Image: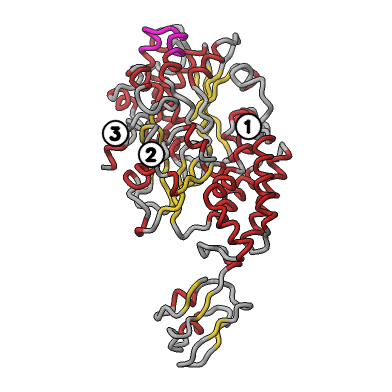
Amino acid sequence: MAEKKQLRIATRNSGFIDPENIDSYIAAGGYLGLAKCLGEMTPDQVIETMKASGIRGRGGAGFPTGVKWGFASKYASDDKYVVCNADEGDPGAFMDRAILEGDPHSVLEAMAIGAYAIGGNKGTIYIRAEYPMAIERLKIAIKQAEEKGVIGKNIMGTDFSFDLDIKYGAGAFVCGEETALINSMEGNRGEPYTKPPFPAEAGYWDKPTIVNNVETLASIPAIIVKGAEWFNGIGTETSKGTKVFALAGKINNVGLIEVPMGITLQEVIMEVGGGVRDGKEFKAVQTGGPSGGALTYKDLDVKIDYESLVACQSMMGSGGMIVMDQDDCMVSIAKFFVEFTMEETCGKCTPCRIGSKRIYEALDKITMGQGSLEDIEKLKQMSNAIKDTALCGLGQTMPNPVLSTMRVFEDEYTAHVVDKKCPAGVCSDLLEFVVVDDKCVGCTLCKRVCPVDCISGNAKEIHVIDQAACIKCGACLDKCKFDAIIKQ
C-alpha cells in the first residue's frame, strides 16, 4: 500500500545507481537532458519548458522555477551564476543530503541546464560542512563530469562552458534564505538584504544569479527528458510534481518519502507512514520546519500542496514532517520551535530579533503556570505584527508554530493559564505526582528511588509526596508496581 502512494522523481536514482561512478548515472539516462538542451533546444525553449511544467522551488517559498530563470536570462552580464542551495537547516530533515549522497550528478546536470537557459557560465554549490559524505561525492562527481566533458569548457563539443565549485556553510539556519546565502558565499555575515534588486538581477558578486535548492534541481533533468506535460500532469492545479518529505517523530515508518502533490495528510501519515507509533492517537504534525506550522487531526483530509498548507497557518518548507501524538503539549511544542528560531535569527531586523525573544518569554511564562489570558492575546498580536514586518522569510514565518497551534489547540493554552494544568502532562511546573491511597501498599520502593527524598511513609503505610520538594523527575511513577502513583 505504502509503495503505491509514492512516486520518485527527485529521488529516482537514489539507491539504484553507484553515486561515485558517472557511467552508472549515464546508464540510467543521466546527462540526456543536458544533451537534449544543447542539441535540440534554445535557452528560451528550456525556460518555457520549465514554466510549462509548473515546477516551483522546493526550498520553501514555492516560487516558480521557470519564472526565476526567465528573470535572470534578461540581464546581460559577462558572468552569470547558478547556485545550488544545499544549506539544509531544518531539524530532522535530510532530503538534500540523501539526494546529494545518492545521486549527485542529477544536481550537476540540472545546474548546467540552468546555466545554459539563463546564459550563465559559473556555478557554486553552497553546502553545510556537516555533510562530509555528500561533499566527498560531489567532489568526485565534479571531477568525473569534467573528465567526461559534461562540465567545464565547450561542453559536448558546443561553445557552452560551465564551471562548478563548492563552498561550505557553517550551518546557520538563516543562510537557507537566498540573500543571506549569497552574503555568506561572499565572505560576509550571513544575513538577508532588502529586495529589490533580486538575485536574478544582481546576486552573487552583483551578477545575475539564480538560486535553486537540491530537490528542485534533481527534478529538472527528468522534466527535460520526459517533457513539461508529463510533469504538469502530476499534482494539483497549482502545485505540480512530487515532494520529498522527511518523516520523523512518533510515526512507525520514519525516513524519506516522495509523494505526488495533492496527496492527503491522512495518506501520508496513516498509509505511507504506517500510522502513529504504539497505537496512540495522532494529534498533529509539524510541517515546514521550525518556522512552519502544525497540521492537526482536523486537517487529515487536507491536500499537501503550497496553498492548502498556507491556509492552515503552515507551509511546505523544505519538507520536514515531525509527527506528534496525544502525549505532546502543543504549547510546549510551539515554545520549542520558537526557541530554535530565536537562537538562529541573524538579528538584523527588530521584529525578528526582539519579537522572537518576547514570544519565547510569553510561552515560557505560560508553560510555567505564570501566564494569563492577556498573555495569550499578546501572543496573537505579536505574532501577526512580526509576520507583517520582519525582513525575510525566516522572521515572517517564525510565529507560525504559535498561530497554527492556537488555531486548533487554544483550549490547551487556556488550560495552562486558567486551570494551571498541562492537559498533556508535559510541562513540569504544572505537574503533580500523587499517591493513590487505595492502591499504595507501602512497599517503600518509590521512597527509595526518589533522588530528593521527598516521599515519606513507613513500610506498609500509605506514602505521601511533598509537592514543594518534588522535582517532577517521575522516578517514583516508573518504579511503582501497583499503579499507586499518578501524574496529574
Location of mark 3 (residue): 16
From this view, report whether residue 335 is shown above or below residue 57. Answer: below
Separation of disc 2 and disc 3 at Cα?
A: 28 Å
Upstream in sequence: badge 1 or badge 2: 1
Nearest the camera: 279 or 372? 372
From this view, report whether residue 481 is shown above or below residue 290. Answer: below
Taking the image as shown, residue 350 lies to the left or right of residue 290, namely right
Q: Can you tell which of label 1 and label 3 is closer to the viewer?
A: 1
Q: Position of residue 191 (x, y in %)?
A: 66, 34
Q: Position of residue 177 (x, y in %)?
A: 59, 32
Judging from the image, what secondary structure is the residue with disc 2 in? loop
Please, what is the three-letter code of the amino acid marked with disc 2?
Answer: Thr
Residue 137, by quadrant, is top left
- Viewer can see residue 105: no
The residue positioned 36% from the left and 32% from the top of the image is: 260
Judging from the image, what secondary structure is the residue with disc 3 in? loop
* Mark 1 neighbour density, 10 Å: few (under 14) some (14–19) many (20 or more): many
The residue positioned 45% from the left and 12% from the top of the image is: 48
From this view, report whether residue 338 is shown above or below residue 76. Answer: below
